[in-house]
């Protein structure tokens, strides 16, 4: 279960690095998760405060058209790293899997989600003249919060959510292959 929690937390890190980090930090602080050294420092109040400040900056920057693109470029390094950190921190030593493989899986999951986000967001900004940026960003933040909570509270459900996301992406890809567009033909 700890491995599912860790990998489940790395997925929303691709949308917003600090939401799953804050979720892990708060869960450690209130002993909902037991993080091993050196990751247990995440549950300290000063670390929760630092993550909270970074989260506020990320939330504000991500809501402003053009600024969100600069933020996504900067976050191209931070989000995958956060995915690796939360994956290995939450998985702990409860598994026989090499910790570096868990880090790699977390980096790849968060990096993949970030790549999709960073690719789709400029299209949203251009097609809506930036008007949809705050709403899309808010939906991404809500999704990251929901997935983070789900990964901590019910990690087995993460498999079903991940399978649903993969299926939805596959359907979009197939639609593109068949119709030449991501939008269904009338």
Image (cartoon, rainbow, N blue to C red):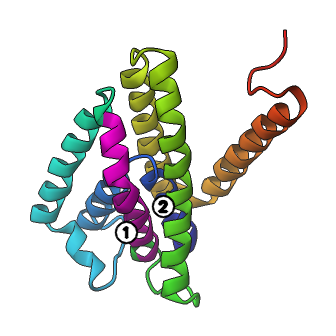
Nearest to viewer (mark 2 / mark 1): 2
Q: Hey, which residue is sitting farthest top in the picture?
A: 186
In the rendered image, residue 154, in percent from the top left (x then y), is placed at: 55, 55
The residue wearing badge 1 is 33
Across and down, in percent, residue 160 comes to 69, 51
Residue 135, quarter of the rendered image: top left
> Is residue 83 rendered magenta in the image?
yes
| Front-lying residue, 100 or 121 | 121
Say which quadrant the C terminus sits in.
Answer: top right
Rendering coords of residue 127 (x, y %): 52, 18
Asked if residue 1 can be seen in this view, the reply is: no
127 or 25: which is nearer to us? 127
Of 52 and 94, the residue lying toward us: 52
Question: From what the image shows, is residue 95 above or below residue 168?
Answer: below
Q: Residue at x 29, y 77 (%)?
A: 39
Q: Residue furthest left?
A: 46
* Extent of the magenta region: 68-88
Crowdedness of circle 2 by 10 Å Cα count: few (<14), some, many (20+)?
Answer: many
Main SS category, magenta section? helix
Mark 2 or 1, nearer chain start = 2
Element type where label 2 sits in the image: helix
Residue at image x 44%, y 50%? 149
- Cβ–Cβ below 8 Å for labels 2 and 1? no
Q: Which mark is residue 10?
A: 2
Q: Quadrant of the N terminus?
A: bottom right
| Label 1: few (<14), some (14–19) or many (≥20) C-alpha neighbours in 10 Å | many
Tell me if 180 is positioned left or right of 67 in this view. right
Tell me, yes or no, whether the highlighted magenta stretch contains residue 33.
Answer: no
Q: Nearer the viewer, residue 145 or 63?
A: 63
Q: CA distance from mark 2 to mark 1?
A: 15 Å
**Secondary element type, mark 1:** loop
Q: Residue at x 48, y 39 (%)?
A: 143
């Amino acid at each position: 279960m700890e491995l599912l929690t860790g990998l489940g937390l790395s997925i929303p890190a691709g949308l917003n690095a600090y939401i799953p980090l804050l979720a892990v930090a708060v869960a450690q602080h209130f002993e909902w998760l037991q993080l091993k050294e050196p990751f247990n420092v995440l549950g300290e109040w000063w670390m929760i405060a630092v993550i909270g400040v970074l989260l506020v900056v990320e939330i504000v920057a991500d809501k402003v058209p053009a600024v969100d693109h600069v933020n996504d470029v900067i976050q191209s390094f931070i989000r995958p790293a956060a995915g690796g950190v939360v994956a290995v921190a939450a998985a702990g030593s409860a598994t026989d899997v090499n910790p570096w493989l868990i880090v790699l899986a977390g980096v790849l999951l968060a990096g993949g989600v970030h790549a999709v986000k960073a690719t789709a967001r400029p299209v949203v900004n251009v097609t809506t003249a930036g008007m949809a940026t705050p709403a899309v960003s808010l939906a991404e933040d809500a999704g990251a919060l929901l997935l983070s909570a789900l990964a901590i509270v019910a990690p087995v459900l993460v498999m079903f959510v991940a399978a649903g996301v993969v299926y939805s992406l596959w359907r979009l890809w197939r639609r593109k292959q068949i119709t030449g567009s991501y939008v269904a033909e009338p």
